[in-house]
Amino acid sequence: MIQKILMVYPKIPTTYWSFDHALPFIGKKSSFPPLGLMTVAAMLPPKYEVRLIDLNVATLKREDIEAADIVFVSAMIVQKGSFEQIIALCGECNRPVVAGGPYPISSYQEIKGVDFFVLDEAELSLPRFLADLEAGHPQKLYRDSGKADITRTPVPRFDLIDVGAYDSMPLQYSRGCPYNCEFCDIIEMFGRAQRTKTSEQFLRELDAVKASGFRGSLFIVDDNFVGNHRRVKELLRTVVAWQKNNDYPFSFFTEASIDLAQDDELLDLMVDAGFRMVFVGIETPDEATLAFTQKRQNLKSPILESVEKIQRRGIEVTGGFILGFDTDAPDIFDRQISFIQQAGIPIAMVGLLNALPNTQLWRRLDREGRLKRSTTGNNTHTLHMNFQPRMPESTLIDGYKRVLSELYSPKHYFERCLTLLRRMPPGTKAARSTSWIEIRALLYSLLKQSFSSHGLHYWRYLFRVLSTRPRLFPDAMALAIKGYHLFTITGEISAADRFLFKVNAARHLIQLRVDRIMHSRKRRLAASMERSILRQLSKVQKKHGTFNTGIQVHLQQTFAEFTQRCQVWVSKLRLVASIS
């Protein structure tokens, strides 16, 4: 009989947007916990004993799995590698696995080792699985194409996590988005009719987070928080009152469409409620591309003006940008750099276009015979396309790397930070007191960044903030710390490119030398060359191991090919050496 359920959340690889290198500044282990598993846990009957292990903050041990009757795993595509390791360990421990989340939804037919797939919205598919499980005849697959009534979704189980390990807590208000962007998989999973929770329900979730002891920023994970302006205004009015009654324990950040800027009342309510940041899918400054990809909501008003308007209300804008659209012209790289600099968007999430499964883009490319491989879900480190782009792929990737290196040079990054801070109201955060976490972050930053390779740019930036926007110094420090992560990742990608160049050069040189030895058939030279190859392989393996897992995905193909070629060369040389 199933009584003990272990929930496991896979490791997210280090990428531009994980901010792993910034977390030590504030003494945290991860950005936020797995809201999906915490919500599923709240849906389970009380008779089940539930434990949750997040591999981003803790280690999964064999005894953890052996102590459970069944294991639940949820994953995004980018977590595929860690997901597979978890499944393999569960198999070794002979424990059944239940899988759900975006990665299993898109790829369940290809995933091995999972006993039960509970897919789509858990409010609909989970009860059927649990009923069959308790009856003793669970099925392999549970799907439901319906859309759940999320007003019945329970409050997530915050008691299952160590809230002190995380920088932010996640909450969800709505599902679905009214827009129809060709490359988006959200509308495929959750639909275009936005469903919302009630205001009372959302306030109960705020109460639950507050009761957990957490204080700080809350991430409203909606893919478009402002998809229904009327309803979200109703919510925000109640949140404003709740914040006042509870002495403002939280600030908020979320994702929203750019039409937020056209609704002054909505902007004012978000500011009053405590929203400090919003992520906007800008994608490109090219209007023809926006029309081609069906992102027409970005054409209703000039994007630069909209971004600046949001910033001047006191909300930082972070932006999503994509390279690799069919309509991208050769000048798109310079245009993206110029636009992002003008917009004053410090955190610009620039990625290569990937065709996600079950999207309109995927289906179109499939019809056109242009799909090449499945996506890794990491569009910043996997420097190849999973489809054949119109622009030569090498040109696109080289241009993309140039965009990243220019945007995340300390000079350009701090310039964007200053542009943003000049636009922000000088008293945005003056009312709140400085926390111990901010003091720790300041001291850590001064110690770490003052003597770094970008130390001169760092101090120039801080002096300019202190002389022009001193009351926004805490905001400026937060941006500087994020910059440290972004500079580090950019450096790692550059180092990875140098590594690839050296490996390819070594491969070419070794091939020439092996060919000569095979022609001469000299045993002594064959034995010496074998030792040289093994030393070179050991160096390459050691260097490969120093890169983070996200970078290793980028290096995987070249590393695997080099390792395989070394094995072939060694076998050939040993054959020569064995000839008497």
Image (spheres, grey):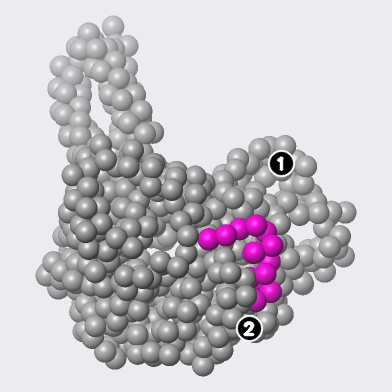
Q: Nearer the viewer, residue 528 or 222?
A: 222
Tell me whether circle 1 and circle 2 mark residues in contact (CB < 8 Å).
Answer: no
What is the crowding at mark 1: few (fewer than 14 residues within 10 Å), some, or many (at least 20)? some
Residue 208 included in the magenta stretch of the image: yes
- Residue 506 seen in render: yes
Please provide percent x and percent y for residue 30. Answer: 51, 51
Q: 433 or 559: which is nearer to us?
A: 433
Query: Residue 267 in magenta?
Result: no
Question: Residue at the spot x=52%, y=88% of the render?
Answer: 233
Residue 400 appears in the rendering: no
Identify the residue under disc 1: 64
Query: Eyeballing the image, is 398 above or below 280?
Result: above
Label 2 amino acid? Ser
Image location (x, y in percent) of residue 204: 69, 74
Magenta region, main secondary structure: helix
User: Where does the N terminus fall, quadrant-wise?
Assistant: bottom right
Q: What stretch is highlighted in magenta?
A: 203-216
Whichever of labels 1 and 2 marks the residue nearer the N terminus, that label is 1
Mark 1 belongs to which amino acid? Asp
Measured along the vertical axis of the image, is residue 380 above or below residue 283?
A: above
Helix, strand or loop for disc 1: helix
Q: How crowded is mark 2: few (under 14 residues within 10 Å), some or many (20 or more)?
A: some
Q: Residue at x 25, y 58 (%)?
A: 465
Question: Which is closer to the viewer, label 1 or label 2?
Answer: 2
Residue 33 lies, in percent from the top left, at 57, 57
Q: Pointer 2: what residue?
A: 199
